Image: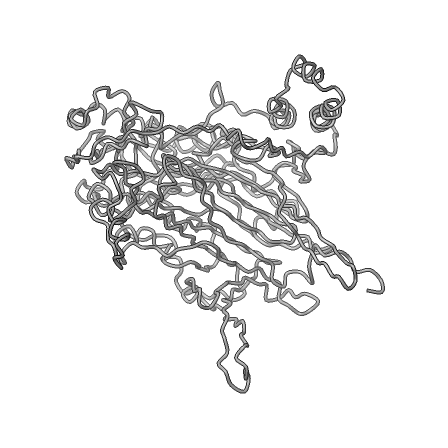
Amino acid sequence: MSRRYAPFQAAGGKSHPSCTRGLFDDLIVGPLRRSSLATPAAVLLDLAKNPRARIAEHFFHRLLPPTLALLLCISCAAPGGSGSSVRPKAPPHPLDPLTAEEIRLAAQCLRAQAKTPQALRFPLIALDEPTKAELAAHRDGSMPQRRALAFLLDLESHKTSEAIVDLSSARVIESRAVREGQAALLEEEYEAVENLVRADARWQEAIRKRGISDLSKVLVDVWAPGAFDNAAHGGARLARALTFDGTHAENAYGAPVEGVVALVNLDTREVVELLDTGSKAPLAKPRDFDATPPTSLTPLEIRQPLGPSFRMEGRELRWAGWEMRLSFHPREGVVFHKVFLADGTARRSVLHRASVSEMVVPYGDPANHWSWRSAFDEGEYHFGRMALQLVPGRDVPSNAIVLDALVAGDDGEPLDLPSAIAIHERDGGLLWKHADSETSVDAARRSRELVVSFGVVIGNYDYLFHWIFREDGILKVETELTGILLGKGTESLSCEACPDLSRGETAPRARGDERFGTLVERNIVAPNHQHLFNFRLDFDIDGPSNSAAELTTRALDMGPENPRGNAFVMETTLLRDESSARRDLDLRTNRHWKVFSPSSRTSLGHLRSFVLAPGHNSIPYQAPGSMSRTRAAFAEHAVWVTRQRESELYAAGNQPGQRATADGLPLWSDGEPIVGEDLVLWYSMGVTHHPRPEEWPIMPSAHASFQLIPFGFFDDNPVAPPVRAGK
C-alpha cells in the first residue's frame, strides 16, 4: 500500500478500546513507562545511591502522581464516581458521531438499493448533522432523527453519488448523482495502483536504466491526478504514481526517481501512460533521521499531580469558562460544535460549528511531470481518516490525554483510529502584569491554555492542527507543518545563483531546476509550493442572528482635526451581502473582520462581537485562469461571509477530485443579504514555502495561525481580579 494512505489501526484489527482503558493507560501506565525507574529493582538501586535525596523524589514525583491517577481512574470507572476529568458515559446527543452500529446500518441500506451491491464502496459515511431548528427542538426533549450522509463509488458503473440515509426508518431518503468530480481515493485503489505500476514493463525498464536493480525496495507513491487529463481519457477515474528509491535508507522520499510518472485508469485497472522524461539526474544518497534528543538537554517534565483542570463528559468538554462539544469527522478531523463562553453568570454562544474545511498544496514547477501536482489533501484524501496516532511525550506534551476516534472505512465497516485527538493544558506566558514603584504594586498572573489537537500524514508531509483556548476568551487556531520536502532530482551540485549574488549582481537569477526551487542537497532541488487552508467558522455570537463588518485603520491627514499629524482612527464598514463580503488582506490598513450580534449589548452599549485577526498568510501565486487556481478558488480571498446552509461544508465543494472547474465558495457566495442573518465566515490561510537547506532531510515544524478575539463580548477583562473596596 502506498504511504500516501496510512491510517493507524489498533493491533488485532478494528476493535474500539474503551475510554476507561485509555484513561488508565494515559494516567498510570504512561507515567510509569516514561519513568527511567519503572521497576522495583531500579527504584531500590537508585535509592541506595543517595537515599536522603531520592526518597522525596520517588514519593512526590514518581509514586504520588500515578497513585492519585489510579484513584481518579477508579472513581471514573466506579458507578456514581465523581471528580474525573473524562467520563466515558453520557446521554446520547444529536451531534454525536455515528456509532459502529449506525455505520453498518447505513451501508446496509445503501447496498440494499444498489444494482451491484458487491461493487459499492463508501469513501465517506458520516453523521448528517441536524439543523439548528432540530437542535433547538432537542432542548425541549425531542431527539432529532439520526441521519447518515454518504459519498458512494460504484466500481462497476464507475459512478460517484451522494446519499442520505434515515437511520430511524432504515431507508435512503435522498440520492443524487455527481456530475463533475470524483470521490476521494479508496484504500484498495492505492494498493491496486501500486501493483499495476510495479507490473508495467515500461516502468520496470525506466527504473532499471536509472541503476536500480531491486525493484522490491522502490516506493510507489500514489497521488490524486489533477484534472489535466480528464478529456483525453473520457472522464475516467484516474490516479498517478511517483517513484522513490528506498534501496539504501528508510527515508525513501529523500531519493526521488526523477522524471518517471505513471498514469493509471482506475476504471479499467491499467497503466494508460508512462511518462519518462529521460532525466539524467543521478539518484541522491538519502539520509535517515534520528529522533533521539540531544544529550546536552536535561530532562523537562510536565506534571499535574491532581490531574487536568478540564472536565469531559461524553463529548462535552468544559474548561475555564469554555464549553464545547468535540467530534471527529472522517474528512475534516476534529470538529467543534456548540462553543460557549461564560460571561459572569451568563452562558453565551460563540460558534455553532468550526473545522478545517479544505487544504490544497499546489507546486510551482512548470515541468510537465510536476505542473499537475496540486493535491487537495482534505477533499481528495479525506485526511480525517489519515489521522496520526498521537503519542504523549512525543507528538504532544506528556500531560496530554488522548482519545480514540471511530469512522467508517471504504467497506462500510467501522474503522478505529486510536489516539486521534489529544487534549492538554499548558503554560501560556503572562496573562497580565503591572508593577508600580509609587504604590509598590507588583502583580501578575500566569496564563493557562487548553489545546485540542489532531494530526494527519499525507505522504511526505505531516500536519498538526491545534485549537488553543485561552482564559481571556481568545481562541487561536494554529497549523503546524513538518515532514519531508518533496524533492526533485537534478544534476546540480551547488547553488547556481549564489556566485552572481556574491559578485554583487543586483538581480541574480537561478537557472534550470533551481529557477523554481532551492537546492537542499546535492542532486536534490525542493520546488516552491504553497499550502492553502480554509477554515469554516459558523458563528453564533450570543445567538444565530449575526452581522459582519470590516475593520480598517486610517491615518488622518494633517489639518484642523489633526494639527500635529499624530491621529489615526479605526473605521468600521458593514458587509451587507455575500458578494461584498469577499475580502482580501491589506497590511496598509491593518484589516480585520468582526462578527457581531446586532441585538446583544454589554453594559457599555457595545455590540457583542468577536474579531478575526489574521496571522501568517499569503495570496495564491498560480496564474489567474490557470487550472490550479480555478480549482482552489476559495484561496482567491482571505475572507468570505455567507449565509449558513447545512449542505455547504467544504470550501472547494464535496468532490474536488478531477474537477476542472470551480466549486464551493464561488458558487455559494451569490449576493444574498447577510445583515442580521445566520452567518458562516470562511477564512483562507496560505503558507508560501520557498524551501531552505535547513529543512532537509526532515523539516523543522513551521507554524501559521489566526486568532478569534472577543471585542466588546465582555463588559471588561474577564480574568482581571475583582476590584477591592476603596480602590
Residue at screen point 69% across, 25% down: 62
Pick out the residue farthest to the bottom: 560
| Horizontal arrangement in the rendering, residue 91 relative to residue 297 (left or right) | right
Which color scheme is applied? one colour
**Residue 696 is drawn in which quadrant?**
top left
| Horizontal arrangement in the rendering, residue 576 relative to residue 475 (left or right) | left
Pick out the residue farthest to the front: 503
Identify whether 58 is placed above or below 133: above
What percent of the width, then of the height, locates residue 124?
A: 41, 37
What percent of the width, then of the height, locates residue 169?
A: 50, 36
Pick out the residue farthest to the top: 41
Identify whether 182 is placed above or below 269: below
Q: Quadrant of the N terminus?
A: top left
Identify whether 12 is placed above or below 719: above
Residue at screen point 85% across, 65% down: 726
Q: Quadrant of the C terminus?
A: bottom right
Count of numbered labels shown in the rendering: 0
- Residue in front for this viewpoint, 309 or 641: 309
What percent of the width, then of the height, locates residue 67?
A: 72, 24
- Residue in front for this viewpoint, 366 or 289: 289
| Horizontal arrangement in the rendering, residue 230 relative to residue 188 (left or right) | left
What percent of the width, then of the height, locates residue 302?
A: 63, 34
Residue at screen point 34% across, 51% down: 632
